[in-house]
């Protein structure tokens, strides 16, 4: 791609193709499909955070007159521990099965044990009470400190820490230890004039999507089956569900409904295999819809973490050494996002001496799921807080300090490759030059700044574009639209075909209609699926040229295509795309383009946020009074959606920093499983989040796109945390900055 | 299955009769914003809901030269639009305005908030500050109870079987009197009080406080009248020392618990801060009025 591309449609703010359905209520979400003869599934969940299951007696529930089927772990058949791609990253099949329905142990309060399908939801709930489970209750382990202690109750007797030269011979709660390093960390600190070292904590936080998990499953007499569900990756739902139930992939169709938020939390299965197992046993379609409290206690929070960061710098602001340590809660089964935490922690800095150590630790909480830039917000929170303190200590502007050390093209990363073209410097300059940063800080307020780095991914995307005889077309993508991908696919295809975007209908096709596509995650869809759309559209253009050439009796090379019109360069003729499509019957049949790719070269997106807060010195309550999110989009295909992603990420990060946290009692039972006491920010809590779109094109994408979905949640933790500390003249080390914690910090230091 | 018998009598006598003679658990239905949630999923075989909104006066408010007579079931949405009441009892109206969302306020009522008897109810400290009286009708006739004695425990009140709240009355305050209610929540709306404080202040022409009432909420099993806090204000010009003394008295009177909404130490401190701030606002209003 060239630096200065001229676009006809890219960059416009078109009307979103899913808008009318959503604002009128016509859109069909996870809970909206009902089928003839359908019955209802409900889940029995553990009242204990940690217990052995001595016995499960389902006979009384099965005898209930309205009950059609009861399932337990045994109904999954023979599941073995093997790794499959189940959403964002690999998952162990046996762990997945044991999370859907507990085997011999329950590992968190709310852990599913059995499920009932009955004529009504009420009957199913009544039948759950008839299931007799005998437990041997064990002590719960609720945080990394307790879990890592010598002699702590062990969740999995077969877990031996990976990542040491010699694997320990006794089991523990530490699944993995990982160390990454480069340069000479000791020499780096020896060079430093100033060293800052601090320890931090972040809480268990939930993605907080508004739509609870829901699905309808149907297992037919002939062995064909169907699952309808709200998911970020219906192909991955197919993989996981087929594996747990022992089905061929061709026998299971998964349809992705509209989705009411996912943020990473809808990349894994919970109810889908259970509902299909119930349907197989009952001979009827089964619907399962979680309650809000089930969503909180049994689906994907992100890791609470304990972290340490140590940074050394010279008086002139040159950072000489960066060292990190982190322990992430994985929840009940191994697999926290500790590794991306280790990888991203110091990546915004061009420093040669870096060392980071991380631990993946199981605890008696729901298994964590991906959450927007999984693992990065916690690690970069610790890093950015310490970098701000370094700036403070040497008396340098925090943006200047970052500009002096900013990662750029050629910067060596701790995880291997050197960075390609990135836009951190441009983001920092935009922050420095912003109206917000130039504005004076009001009395009693604090200001925080933080940067954020996320890799973004590419991966497999499959797309078909089917042209109609009137020159309009349908775009089939395999990536559920959680953040506007239908609009951007429409625009990218329109750009290639040079026709109005509204002439192209983008849909999310089911698993029978397209080859495998990875789920929507890793900010990959506008980048990777976008490339597949461009390839499919170019395929259409190629065929348009061939068909026109056939009509004109010239070669395809003699046909040009511009502004939606095929032109015979060897003659005078012209045919519009619609005319060529209309004539398709006579030139060899209908026209459709495909783009089935495995995209490489996802460009990282850096973000820089500015936050002003005002703190009530007597109550500790924090008000965000001004907030600006600056981020590199590469190229903003649909700027409104890009701004929405910046704002959404910022708001989720602000919530995480200010009030969101799981509260557990001494028995490991969550005490705030609802939006009343799990406090995500309300619209009235926040100012308008200002945005600045920086565009440093990604050379691997034809239009320069970088994914923008995730980086925006990273900087808020430190931007808010530093801002609050600045307002009260203290150093924040623990999130969230809830009023009691801030008041205690004000009064007790 | 839950089976609800719904009755909507048009007189106090009819309601009392239904409630007194019910042989299944009987509930008074006003807006239902608490009741429906509390009884949803209940496995009781049968229940009686007595909807009191058809009874004359139940959903009206009348401000006379001598008193405010409030129908307990008047929706908060209607109540908060009564400009005459707002002019006299701005604090009580702002407490009603804090209950739930705009949609919920279309159903929720001050009397319902009182009868639900939650320690964190927003209107109760404001009613206490204004010396509200509860007129209770029952099989034996009517009785009147000061609002601070109405609630007897968490979710409990002094009403016996067959009784219902007929009216809330508040005497029209003396000249140069006003009130304020403040609650603390970690966010801006849609939340439940971590602590709350209602204060009514009467000033003389020199700006000296001649009478005060202080009610606090969410810091004890019931909302409390705090005479010591009021005593700290009376006789003062609401200077910093008097305000701090009132705050300290409120903190001392509180006996909060630690739960998911706050800790003992935090609630105790914050309720004092709220008393101080509410007293200041009430005094400003009293001067202005």
Image (cartoon, rainbow, N blue to C red):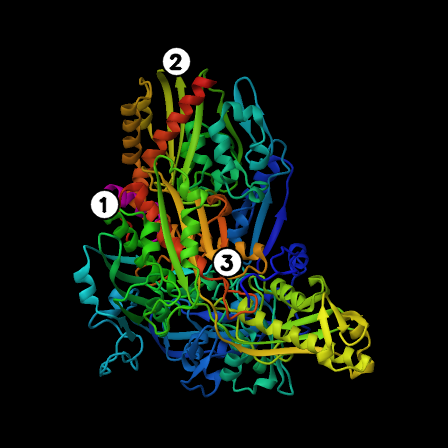
Where residue A730 sits: x, y (%)? Answer: 26, 45
Q: What is the secondary structure assignment of the residue under circle 2? A: loop
Magenta residues, dominant SS class = helix
Give the foreground label among 3 and 2.
3
Residue A288 is at least partly visible in this image = no
Give the foreground label among 1 and 3.
3
Where residue A445 sits: x, y (%)? Answer: 36, 39
Q: Residue at x 28, y 50 (%)?
A: A391
Question: Is A231 in front, or is A247?
Answer: A231
Where residue A43 sits: x, y (%)? Answer: 49, 70
Q: Quadrant of the N terminus of chain A?
A: bottom right
Near mark 3 (Cα within 10 A), the count class, few <14, some 14-19 or many ≥20, is: many
Near mark 2 (Cα within 10 A), the count class, few <14, some 14-19 or many ≥20, is: some
Give the foreground label among 1 and 2.
1
Residue topped by disc 1: A749
Residue topped by disc 3: A695
> Height in image: A125 above or below B51?
below
Residue topped by disc 2: B204
Q: Are marks 1 and 3 in contact (CB under 8 Å)?
A: no
* Range shown magenta: A734-749
* The disc label shown at residue A649, or none: none
Q: Is residue A250 left or right of residue A183?
A: right
């Amino acid at each position: 791609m060239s630096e200065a591309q001229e676009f006809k449609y890219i960059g416009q703010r078109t009307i979103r193709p899913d808008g009318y359905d959503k604002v009128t209520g016509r859109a069909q979400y996870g809970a909206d499909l009902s089928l003839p003869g359908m019955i209802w599934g409900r889940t029995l969940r553990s009242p204990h955070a940690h217990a052995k299951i001595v016995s499960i007696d389902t006979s009384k529930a099965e005898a209930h007159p309205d009950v059609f089927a009861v399932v337990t772990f045994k109904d999954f058949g023979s599941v073995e521990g093997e790794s499959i791609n189940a959403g964002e990253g690999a998952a162990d099949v046996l762990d997945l099965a044991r999370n859907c329905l507990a085997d011999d142990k329950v590992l968190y309060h709310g852990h599913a044990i059995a499920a009932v399908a009955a004529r009504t939801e009420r009957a199913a709930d009544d039948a759950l009470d008839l299931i007799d489970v005998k437990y041997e209750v064990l002590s719960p382990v609720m945080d990394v400190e307790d879990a890592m202690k010598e002699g702590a109750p062990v969740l999995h007797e077969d877990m031996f820490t990976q990542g040491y030269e010699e694997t320990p011979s006794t089991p523990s709660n530490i699944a993995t230890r990982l160390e990454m390093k480069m340069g000479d960390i000791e020499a780096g600190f020896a060079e430093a004039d100033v060293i800052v070292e601090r320890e931090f904590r972040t809480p268990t936080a939930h993605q907080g999507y508004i739509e609870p998990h829901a699905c309808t499953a149907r297992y037919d007499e002939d062995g064909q089956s169907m699952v309808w569900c709200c998911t970020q990756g219906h192909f991955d739902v197919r993989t996981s569900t087929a594996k747990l139930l022992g089905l061929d992939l061709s026998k299971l169709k998964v349809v992705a409904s509209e989705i009411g938020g996912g943020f990473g939390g809808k990349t894994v299965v919970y109810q889908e295999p259970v509902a299909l197992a119930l349907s197989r046993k009952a001979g009827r379609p089964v619907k399962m819809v979680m309650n809000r409290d089930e969503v909180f206690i049994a689906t994907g929070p992100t890791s609470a973490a304990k972290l340490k960061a140590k940074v050394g710098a010279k008086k002139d602001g040159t950072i000489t050494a960066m060292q990190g340590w982190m322990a992430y809660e994985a929840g009940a089964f191994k697999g926290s996002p500790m590794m991306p935490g280790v990888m991203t922690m110091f990546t915004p800095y061009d420093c040669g001496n870096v060392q980071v150590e991380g631990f993946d630790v199981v605890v008696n909480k729901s298994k964590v799921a991906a959450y927007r830039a999984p693992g990065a917000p916690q690690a970069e929170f610790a890093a950015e807080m310490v970098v701000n303190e370094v700036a403070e200590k040497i008396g340098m502007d925090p943006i200047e300090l970052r500009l002096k050390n900013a990662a750029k093209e050629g910067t060596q990363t701790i995880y291997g490759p050197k960075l390609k073209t990135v836009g951190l410097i441009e983001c920092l300059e935009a922050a420095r030059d912003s109206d917000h940063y130039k504005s004076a800080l009001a009395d009693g307020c604090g200001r925080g700044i933080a940067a954020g780095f996320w890799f973004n991914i590419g991966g497999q995307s499959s797309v078909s574009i089917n042209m109609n005889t009137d020159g309009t077309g349908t775009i089939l993508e395999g990536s559920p639209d959680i953040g506007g991908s239908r609009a951007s696919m429409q625009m990218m295809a329109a750009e290639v075909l040079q026709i109005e975007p509204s002439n192209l209908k983008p849909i999310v096709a089911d698993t029978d209609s397209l080859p495998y596509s990875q789920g929507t995650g890793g900010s990959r869809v506008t980048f990777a699926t976008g490339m597949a759309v461009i390839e499919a559209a170019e395929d259409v253009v190629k065929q348009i040229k061939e068909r026109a050439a056939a009509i004109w009796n010239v070669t395809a090379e003699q046909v040009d295509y511009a502004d939606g019109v095929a032109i015979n360069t060897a003659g005078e003729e012209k045919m519009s795309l619609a005319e060529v499509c209309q004539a398709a019957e006579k030139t060899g049949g209908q026209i459709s383009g495909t783009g089935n790719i495995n995209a490489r070269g996802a460009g990282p997106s850096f973000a820089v946020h500015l936050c002003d807060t005002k703190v009530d010195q007597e109550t500790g309550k924090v008000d965000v009074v001004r907030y600006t999110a600056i981020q590199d989009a590469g190229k903003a295909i649909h700027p409104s959606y890009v701004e929405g992603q910046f704002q959404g990420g910022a708001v989720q990060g602000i919530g995480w920093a200010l009030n969101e946290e799981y509260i557990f009692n001494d028995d490991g039972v969550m005490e705030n499983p609802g939006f009343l006491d799990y406090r995500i920010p309300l619209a009235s809590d926040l100012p308008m989040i200002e945005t600045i779109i920086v565009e440093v094109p990604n050379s691997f994408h034809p239009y320069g796109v970088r994914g923008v979905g995730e980086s925006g949640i990273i900087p808020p933790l430190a931007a808010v945390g530093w801002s609050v500390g600045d307002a009260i003249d203290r150093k924040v080390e623990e999130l969230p900055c809830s009023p009691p914690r801030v008041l205690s910090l004000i009064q007790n230091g | 299955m839950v089976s609800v018998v719904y009755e909507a009598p048009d007189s106090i006598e009819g309601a009392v009769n239904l409630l007194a003679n019910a042989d299944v658990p009987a509930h008074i239905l006003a807006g239902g914003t608490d009741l429906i949630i509390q009884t949803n999923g209940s496995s009781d075989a049968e229940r009686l809901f007595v909807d009191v909104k058809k009874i004359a006066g139940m959903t009206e408010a009348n401000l006379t030269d001598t008193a405010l007579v409030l129908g307990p079931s008047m929706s908060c949405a209607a109540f908060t639009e009564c400009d005459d009441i707002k002019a006299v009892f701005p604090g009580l109206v702002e407490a009603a305005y804090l209950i739930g969302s705009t949609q919920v306020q279309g159903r929720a009522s001050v009397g319902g908030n009182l009868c639900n008897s939650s320690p964190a109810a927003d209107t109760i400290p404001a009613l206490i500050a204004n010396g509200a009286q509860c007129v209770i009708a029952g099989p034996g006739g009517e009785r009147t109870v000061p609002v601070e004695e109405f609630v007897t425990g968490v979710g409990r009140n002094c009403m016996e079987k067959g009784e219902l709240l007929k009216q809330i009355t508040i005497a029209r305050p003396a000249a140069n009197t006003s009130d304020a209610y403040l609650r603390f929540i970690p966010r801006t709306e849609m939340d439940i009080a971590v602590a709350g404080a209602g204060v009514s202040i009467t000033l003389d022409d020199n700006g000296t406080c001649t009478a005060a009432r202080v009610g606090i909420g969410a810091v004890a099993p019931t909302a409390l009248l705090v005479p010591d806090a009021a005593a700290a204000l009376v006789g003062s010009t609401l200077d910093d020392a008097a305000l701090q003394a009132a705050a300290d008295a409120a903190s001392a009177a509180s006996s909060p618990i630690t739960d998911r909404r706050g800790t003992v130490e935090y609630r105790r401190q914050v309720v004092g801060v709220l008393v101080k701030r509410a007293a200041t606002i009430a005094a400003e209003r009293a001067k202005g009025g």
